[in-house]
Image: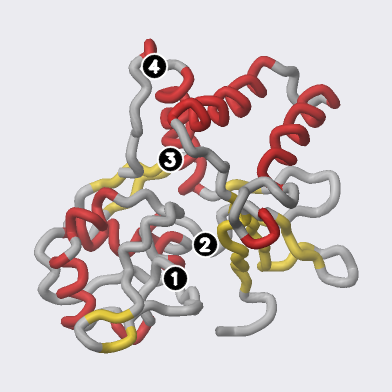
Amino acid sequence: MFGVDDAFGNPQQFTVIFEYNLPAKTAKDVSNWAEYWHKLGSLPFPSEQYNAALETITHRFIDRGSQAGAINGSALSSLRTNEIALSNNKETPDLSFNGTSTFADFVNENAAAIEAEVPGANDNTVPVTFEGQPFLAGSIFNDLIEWSAPGITTEDARFHASLNTCNGCHGPETNTTFLMITPRFFGQTAQLSPFLTGTQVVGQDGVSQTLNDLARRQLDLESLVCPSQGGADAGHD
């Protein structure tokens, strides 16, 4: 993730996110990737030794030819921007469907898949079309809303459907005001959002949801490299 500065070096509300696949064909390949990341924990941080090891891992998936059969052999899965610096205005329906019976139908018909999905994953439960009309948004304005509609049968499904959208995840559903990682001035530490570091949000039914995406990712990693510890996916609720 890269933060964008203006001509005077001031951080903008603008980030560019490069998301890569970690090429793997077998369970052993997956385990190897987990080991690469896990071994970073044995190195002093911050240090040049840590930086060099991280760079070596990074080149395994960012270099041309990293993923055979892909365009230019690139393992890049998506290039995303998260910005309001350029205008006042994926897993997200078009904003016009918020509050409609169409959105309620979508949530009710796909409740199990929606509740199982981790924000940021590429499971793509939102179809391009739904009920015979275009449904998936190409981009979305973040007006810090919650997605909802009359007729949704369970709050848990509504919450996860909203959480899995771009503007839902970057808004009140996660106690976040737009950016997950805030661009910084040179020499300063970037600030992480409550969604990443841990927070509790109260759903429309008054039930509290606990979110801590970095802890969830840690448990996922431990489940691959430390199975004897009983690591498991913490989910995101």
* Mark 4 to mark 1 CA distance (whole Å): 39 Å
Q: Residues within 10 Å of mark 3 (few under 14, many from 20)?
A: many
Could you tell me the amino acid type at mark 1? Leu
Which of the marked residues, 3 or 1, is nearer the chain's N terminus?
1
Residue bearing the label numbered 2: 177
Could you tell me the amino acid type at mark 4? Pro
* Mark 3 to mark 1 CA distance (whole Å): 20 Å
Q: Indicate left or right for 103 with 4 as reference.
A: left
* Mark 4 to mark 3 CA distance (whole Å): 21 Å
Q: Which of labels 4 and 1 is toward the front?
A: 4
The numbered dot on residue 212 is: 3
Which of the marked residues, 4 or 3, is nearer the chain's N terminus?
3
Q: Indicate left or right for 216 with 42 as reference.
A: left
Residue bearing the label numbered 1: 144
- Give x and y (percent) for residue 212: 43, 40
Callout 4 touching callout 1 (CB < 8 Å): no
Residue bearing the label numbered 4: 227
Q: Quadrant of residue 77?
A: bottom right
Q: Indicate left or right for 11 with 104 as reference.
A: right
